[in-house]
Amino acid sequence: LKVGADIVYDSGTKYMSGHHDVMAGLIAVSSPDVAKQIAFMINSVGSGLSPFDSFLVLR
């Protein structure tokens, strides 16, 4: 985002959790309006992490 990108996506499967037992990712945006649109889409299609998957990423 510092170099001018509007949206950055990163895989959290290996980088954040260190294992291969969870599918995760993160999205960083520079605009609050875009963040609201993406959050709405994630919630409406049900593609957010479950509580257990969140635990697996944080362990």
Image: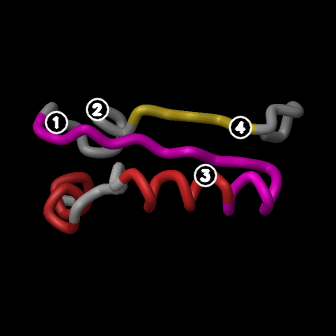
Q: Is residue 29 above or below residue 20?
A: below
Given the image, on which type of amino acid does mark 1 rest?
A: His
Measuring from the top left, give residue 9's x and y in whole percent: 56, 34
Instruction: Write the residue at 39% across / 51% down.
Output: 45
Q: Which residues are magenta?
A: 21-36
The disc, 3 or 1, on the residue closer to the chain's N-terminal end is 1
Q: Which mark is residue 7?
A: 4
Mark 4–mark 2 distance (CA, rounded to whole Å): 21 Å
Q: Residues within 10 Å of mark 3 (few under 14, many from 20)?
A: some
Mark 2–mark 1 distance (CA, rounded to whole Å): 6 Å
Instruction: Write the residue at 78% across / 62% down.
Output: 32
Q: Nearer the viewer, mark 4 or mark 2?
A: 4
The image quadrant that residue 23 belongs to is top left
Q: Which mark is residue 14?
A: 2
The image quadrant that residue 2 belongs to is top right
Where is mark 3, residue-wise?
A: 38
- Point out the image quarter for the C terminus: bottom left
Measuring from the top left, give residue 19's x and y in whole percent: 16, 36
Residue 25 shown in magenta? yes
Q: Nearer the viewer, residue 23 or 42?
A: 42
- Point out the image quarter for the N terminus: top right
Q: Is residue 33 left or right of residue 47?
A: right
